Structures are given as structure tokens and as C-alpha cells.
Image (cartoon, rainbow, N blue to C red):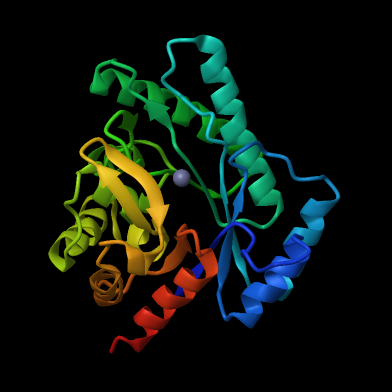
Amino acid sequence: MDKLLFGTAGIPNKTNPRTYENAFDDLVEMKLGCMEIEFVRGVNMNAKTIPVVKQISQEKGLILTAHGPYFINLASPEQDKVDASVKRILDTARVAYACGGYSITFHAAFYMGQDKKFVHNQVKSKMTEIISTLKSENIKIWVRPELTGKASQWGDLDELIQLSNEVEMVLPCIDFAHLHARSGGNWNTYDEFARVFERMGNEIGQHALENFHAHIAGIEYTAKGERKHLNLEESDLKYKELMKAFKDFNVKGTIICESPDIEDDAILLQKTYKALK
Ligand SMILES: [Zn+2]
């Protein structure tokens, strides 16, 4: 990726009627550069829609990413749930790739009282299998477990960096709201944001900073982690410092805004970033 793009988690709120085609028109009009297709309740795109989404998004120069279903747990003790999770991730990747997509993200697993290391190894083993299936189908897309918002979920920064080094085609989706909420309020200063980029560049490699995918939103949280998303100005997230760190580390890729006002906050982030020298 040669620049940093900003966009919405799903079709913009104002888009009406709510088609992908209208969404892409609105994104272009708002000068946003990307959109995440939300498959959070299932990978449900009509087969006829897929080539249209690909063609129109490419004509308009928009980058697409996708968010997989919430019902995913690669470390479930129940085998049928693991199998269904693998299929949901594969289907997300297949449809996103057919749409011309750049990357997919999903919440990979819950600890459910199991040992953290055991859960990591389960995730690693299933992700290895998923990548090998995608390669056999000639599907080339970044597969990104998301940095999750609760301490009960697999997917902290260490685990994501480790998995990115263990399985090819895997890079993190860094959700800065989750990172902040998960720790009960840390990870909210310039130095802490800079540490995320330093670690990814040093421990994964420069390509991780040139193909970055982030989720950003305001967030309400308790000691246990995330509670709900908020608009940036109603939250304590230091988004200006975050944008400065993105700029200073020359990070390229896609930033998806998940605030309730998805498009207004995506525009605010982009404006803040572009005003930086
Ligand atoms: Zn997510």
C-alpha cells in the first residue's frame, strides 16, 4: 500500500438506499478511501453482487476489507464449533477476495478458562490450516486476527505479533480502542502508540507498517475491558496523538472507523492526520 486510507465500518450511516453502489458514491463524495464490509452476522453476499462490488469499488479507487462473523472461536473445546469457525473465516476470505478485497479481520478465539499458551497453539494450528486452504485456492489476502477488547479473548498485542511470525499471510488488525479498553485505560499516549509501531516494525518487519490495518473508535470500558463504542469527541481516546504516531512512523494501509458516527469520525481522523506536518 502506498498511502494511509480512512474509511467506515460498513455502509455509511447516511447512505440511502443502503446498497454497496450508493455507499461507494458516498465514500468518494466524502473523500474517504476504504470501507470494511461487515459480515459480522454471516457471510451473506449475493453471488451476483460480488462482481459488481469488485468492479465499482475498483473504478472508484476504493480499497475494501471485510470483518468476519462474531461467532468464531478457533479454540472451542467443541470440535463442531471449531470447524464452523474455520469455515466462517474461509468464507469471509473467499468472498472478500472475490470482491477485490485487501484484507479480512475477525475475533479469533476465547480462552474459556483454558491455558493461554494452549489456546495460542490451537489458534496457530487452525490458522495454519486456513492459510494452506486459501493458498490451494489461489486466494491472496491478508488474514488478520483482531486485537480484542476483553481479557477473556485471545488476541493481545504479544499474541498477534507472535502469530504473525508463525503463520504466513497473517498480520494483526490493531484495534486501538480495544487495546486501550483491554488494559483498563492504558495505551493512550503518544509513546504507547509509538511502541505499537516500533514493536510491529522490529518484531514482524517493515511490511507490517506498510500494510497496516487499524480499527479506531472512542470507547467506554471497565476494568474487564470494552463496554461500548463512543464517538471520538465523547471519549477519552487521544486520537490526535494516535494520528501523530501514524504520521511519524509513516504507516501505510487502512484505518476503519467504528464509532457510532462512522463517517463523521472517519473524516475527523483523516482531517487530523492530513493537518499534521
Ligand atoms: Zn472486530
Task: Give the x, y percent position of residue 273.
Answer: 36, 79
Outermost residue, right side: 48
Outermost residue, left side: 191
Instruction: Name the residue nearer the viewer: 86 or 20.
Output: 20
* In the image: residue 249, left or right of residue 216: left
* In the image: residue 234, left or right of residue 84: left
Residue 117's image quarter?
A: top left
Is any atom of residue 209 visible in this view?
yes
Task: Give the x, y percent position of residue 145.
Answer: 42, 41
Count the labels in the image: 0
Tell me: residue 168, above or below residue 83. below
Write the residue at 23% across / 72% down.
241
Task: Give the x, y percent position of residue 144.
Answer: 45, 45
Q: Which quadrant, please, contains the C terminus?
A: bottom left
Write the residue at 44% across / 66% down.
253
Write the residue at 34% across / 18% down.
112
Outermost residue, top side: 78
Write the residue at 44% across / 17% down.
76
